[in-house]
């Protein structure tokens, strides 16, 4: 039953609120909560920890694959760790053919293991922890590029891989994007930023040749895969430039005012990232896959932009940045709603509200001529604006959550350091923890 409930949960998570009420006759969040309880009960009844099975592991993996769509807590990271241990206890991380299993079982288990690794490589990044199994030497091959219909229990050997877009190509492309970009950045970390940028941009061409050259640009799923590649490369470039800037000793020594000096190149890259991801997460580009993009909130970019606007309300393209922040904030409402229904405000919004209000106050002071820079500060450094296609459109107003968030950022930092959990930021590729931005011993606001 756990597998049935997990599939139902995933199907519901992939629908919009309107679609759930219209097609299923129930409020989406109530359905999700119902299926979550039934999954928990089914797995507990099956005593999955004592008697693990492939079916139970499949149910857990399907559940976790969509849980991040509306839950920012550490549950996904913790359950992902359990999934890894269950998979290893079942030998899923080993080549099934070497274990004497049939070709069908071997390929099914191979697919399952690589989905587990994908969960592990993404969930920890929400909380700043390193990936448990990322970049480790894998003793099992990647799944075949083949359709489900090519696999059947009675087959005597594995089918030949197809040189065309199959039902597995999207998943394989995602694995390739994540692993290759991660390995590239790790390998070039000690190099100059220009060399890092070149290596990352080369990855885009390599991955396109390996996987996306098979895509039909008229099909929605192929468009999603292409968007994932472009956003992943854009975000990696942004984070590498940001890390390079933050590592500068003069930047570290000016913690209270450093975002005033944030280079325009990094600021504009963050704004551009928010604009592009907003189009994807809001469903304006591909409504049927907006839930997929919503699993990866761009908190690095939104918090960086807000800090820069707070310290420098007069910086280049400030109006454009505010439109990007306000638009993108609407994409975070699912997270806020999920946490409010659990009787608490998410740590992301507990910090976002006061920080955004502080940035707005700086904007108001700049407008009436009362904004004053700290002594010794200089304007934003221009390092050449990143030329990226800006296809975001006008702003959509968002209700001000700051009225529900009376606590100041500084009060939260001092009273509840664990509330900083969400401030380690999500990133498809940011395995390095940037939570130092909000070190509880520094006055960053």
Image (tube, grey):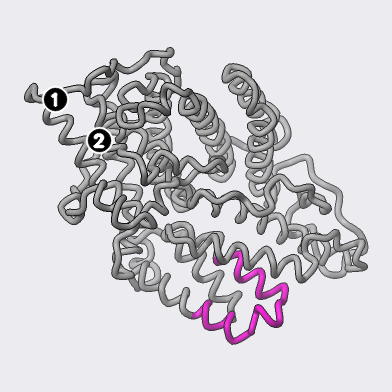
Look at 30% across and 52% down and name the residue there: 414
Left or right: 370, with 390 as reference point = left
User: Can you say which quadrant of the picture contains the C terminus?
Assistant: top left
Residue hosting label 1: 371
Q: Nearer the viewer, residue 31 or 334?
A: 334
Q: Residues within 10 Å of mark 1 (few under 14, many from 20)?
A: some
Q: Residues within 10 Å of mark 2 (few under 14, many from 20)?
A: some
Q: Is residue 418 above or below residue 221?
A: below
As drawn, the label of residue 14 is: none
Left or right: 126, with 442 as reference point = right
Look at 44% across and 50% down and name the residue there: 294
Q: Which residues are magenta?
A: 38-63
Verify CB contact (< 8 Å) between mark 1 and mark 2: no
Residue 195: where, in percent of width, then height? Answer: 63, 18
Res 285 visible: no
Residue 160: where, in percent of width, then height? Answer: 86, 49
Tag in front: 1 or 2: 1
Residue hosting label 2: 395
User: Which element is circle 1 on?
Assistant: loop
Q: What's the CA distance linking mark 1 and mark 2? A: 25 Å
């Amino acid at each position: 039953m756990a597998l049935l409930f997990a599939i139902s949960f995933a199907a519901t998570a992939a629908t919009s609120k309107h679609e759930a009420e219209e097609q299923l006759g129930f409020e989406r969040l109530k359905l999700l909560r119902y299926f979550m309880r039934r999954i928990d009960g089914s797995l507990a009844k099956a005593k999955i920890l004592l008697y693990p099975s492939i079916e139970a592991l499949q149910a857990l993996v399907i559940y976790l694959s969509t849980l991040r769509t509306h839950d920012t807590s550490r549950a996904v990271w913790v359950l992902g760790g359990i999934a890894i241990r269950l998979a290893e206890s079942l030998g899923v991380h080993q080549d099934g053919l070497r274990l004497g299993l049939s070709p069908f079982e071997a390929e099914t288990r191979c697919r399952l293991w690589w989905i587990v690794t994908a969960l592990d490589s993404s969930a920890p990044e929400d909380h700043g922890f390193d990936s448990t199994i990322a970049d480790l030497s894998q003793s099992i091959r990647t799944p075949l590029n083949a359709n489900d219909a090519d696999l059947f229990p009675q087959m005597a050997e594995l089918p030949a891989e197809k040189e065309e877009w199959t039902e597995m190509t999207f998943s394989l492309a995602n694995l390739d994007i994540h692993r290759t970009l991660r390995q590239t950045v790790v390998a070039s970390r000690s190099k100059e930023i220009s060399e890092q940028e070149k290596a990352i941009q080369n990855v885009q061409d390599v991955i396109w040749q390996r996987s996306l050259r098979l895509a039909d640009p008229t099909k929605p799923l192929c468009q999603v895969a292409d968007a994932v590649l472009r956003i992943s490369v854009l975000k990696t470039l942004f984070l590498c430039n940001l890390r390079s800037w933050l590592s500068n000793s003069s930047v570290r020594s000016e913690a209270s005012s450093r975002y005033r000096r944030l280079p325009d190149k990094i600021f504009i890259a963050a704004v551009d990232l928010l604009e592009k991801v907003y189009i994807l997460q809001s469903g304006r580009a591909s409504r049927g896959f907006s839930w997929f993009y919503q699993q990866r909130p761009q908190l690095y970019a939104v918090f960086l932009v807000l800090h820069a606007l707070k310290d420098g309300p007069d910086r280049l393209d400030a109006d454009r940045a505010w439109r990007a922040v306000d638009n993108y904030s609407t994409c975070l409402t699912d997270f806020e709603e999920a946490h409010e229904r659990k009787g608490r405000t998410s740590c992301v919004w507990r910090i976002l509200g006061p920080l955004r209000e502080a940035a707005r106050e700086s904007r108001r002071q700049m407008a009436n001529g009362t904004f004053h820079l700290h002594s010794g500060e200089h304007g934003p450094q221009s390092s050449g604006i990143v030329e990226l296609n800006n296809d975001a459109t006008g702003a959509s107003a968002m209700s001000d959550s700051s009225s529900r968030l009376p606590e100041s950022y500084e009060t939260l930092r001092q009273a509840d350091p664990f509330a900083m959990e969400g401030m380690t930021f999500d990133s498809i590729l940011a395995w390095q923890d940037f939570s130092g931005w909000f070190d509880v011993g520094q006055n960053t606001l």
